[in-house]
Amino acid sequence: MTEPFFADTDAAGSRYYVLNTGERFISVTTVLSYIAKPHLTGWAARLAAEAALDNAERVFIAADTPSCNTKGDNACGLCRDCVTTWLADRHNVYRDAAGDRGSKLHEAAEHREKFGPGGTVDDDAKPFFDAYVDWADRAQPEIIAAEMTVVSRKWGHAGTLDNLMRFGDDSVLPKTLEHLRHKVLLVDKKTSKSIDRTHAWQINGYSLCETAVLEDGSEIPTPAVDSGLILHIRPEAEGGVKMREAHINPLNQAKFIHTLRMAEGVTAPLGDVLSRPAQLPKTKETTK
Ligand SMILES: [Zn+2]
C-alpha cells in the first residue's frame, strides 16, 4: 500500500504534508512554531546556569583548557569550547527528551484506543500513559477517530488531530464540563508543563480542515465537531489529567489563520518581498 501522504521537513525544520496529489500543506504545529516564546530565553539561560553550578569542577578546569578544535563524536568534551557548547545545548536536550516522551504517550494511547489494553510503553513515558489510562477508565470516551490527518484546501494547511471523542451516559465528567456530554469533541493530548492560548489555536486550526485523509488515501469530509478539549497529562499533578475546553469559534479560528498567513510570509521565497541588494556604481557609469 502506498502511504496517502508523507511529512516533508525542509532545511529550516518546517513540516509539510505532501499528498499523493502532489499538493503540499504547511502543518498546524509548524504554523504555531513561528509564535515567539520570550520566556523560553530565560528558561534556557537558567538551565545552562544550573548545569554550570552542578558541574562546577568541570567548568573550572575547562575555563583554562585550550580548544580541541574538534566537533562531533571526536570532540574532547573537556575544553573551553566543548564545555561552552555542552552548556549552551542543555535546553535542546531537555526539549528533545520531553518531545520524545510526548510522542511515546501518543503512540501508546493510539494503540489502546484502536486495539484495547495490552500495549507496551517505555519507562519514561509510562507515568504519562498510566495517568491517561486512569482518566480514560473513568471518562470512558467513545473514540470516533484517532490520529486523523486533516487538510484545509480552503486555507492551505494540514495536520494530524489526536482524537474525535464523545462522552456518553456512563462517563464521569467534571461538573463544569457537563455541557460537553454527548458532543463531538476535537481532542488534543498535551504533556508539556503548561497550557497556553496557542494550544487552543491549534485545535481551532484543525477545526478549519474540511477534509480528512484516510489510511487508504481516500478522502471524506471531516466529521462536524461541537467543541475542543485539551487533556493536560501531568502524572505528578493531583489527578494526573486536567481537562480544559478549547473554544472553537470564528474569533479563535481567525487567530490561527492570522498566524498561518504570517508563517507563509516568513517561509516564502525572499524574492517575493525583497530584491537583490544593489549599490551605487563606484565610477560615473550612467544608467540607460
Ligand atoms: Zn574540546
Image (spheres, helix red, strand yellow):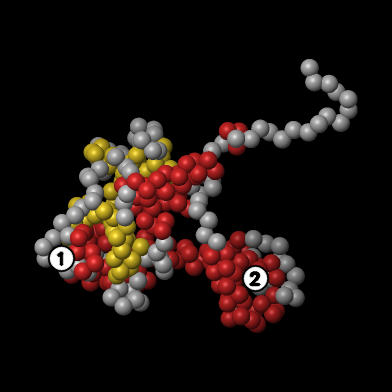
Residue 94 as seen in the image, left or right of residue 86: left
Q: Quadrant of residue 101?
A: bottom left
Q: Say which element carries label 2.
A: helix
Q: Position of residue 245 (x, y in %)?
A: 29, 60
Q: Position of residue 75 (x, y in %)?
A: 64, 65
Name the quadrant of the N terminus. top left
Q: Residue furthest front?
A: 251
Label 2 neighbour load within 10 Å: few <14, some 14-19, many 20+: many
Residue that carries the numbered disc 1 in the rendered image: 171
Name the quadrant of the C terminus. top right
Q: Position of residue 173 (x, y in %)?
A: 19, 67
Q: In front: 153, or 243?
A: 243
Point out which mark residue 83 bears. 2
Q: Residue furthest right?
A: 283
Q: Position of residue 114 (x, y in %)?
A: 20, 56
Instruction: Please report the residue visible at 25 percent of the width from the left and 43 percent of the height from the top.
Output: 222
- Look at label 2 and name its amino acid: Val
Residue 83 as seen in the image, left or right of residue 162: right
Q: In front: 119, or 125?
A: 125
How many circles with numbers are drawn on the protein? 2
| Mark closest to the chain's N terminus, 1 or 2 | 2
Q: Within 8 Å: ligand 1 and the Cβ of disc 1?
A: no
Q: Say which element carries label 1.
A: loop
Q: Within 8 Å: ligand 1 and the Cβ of disc 2?
A: yes
- Look at label 1 and name its amino acid: Ser
Using the image, determine if residue 224 lies above or below residue 285.
below
Instruction: Please report the residue visible at 31 percent of the width from the left and 55 percent of the height from the top.
Output: 247
Q: CA distance from mark 1 to mark 2?
A: 53 Å
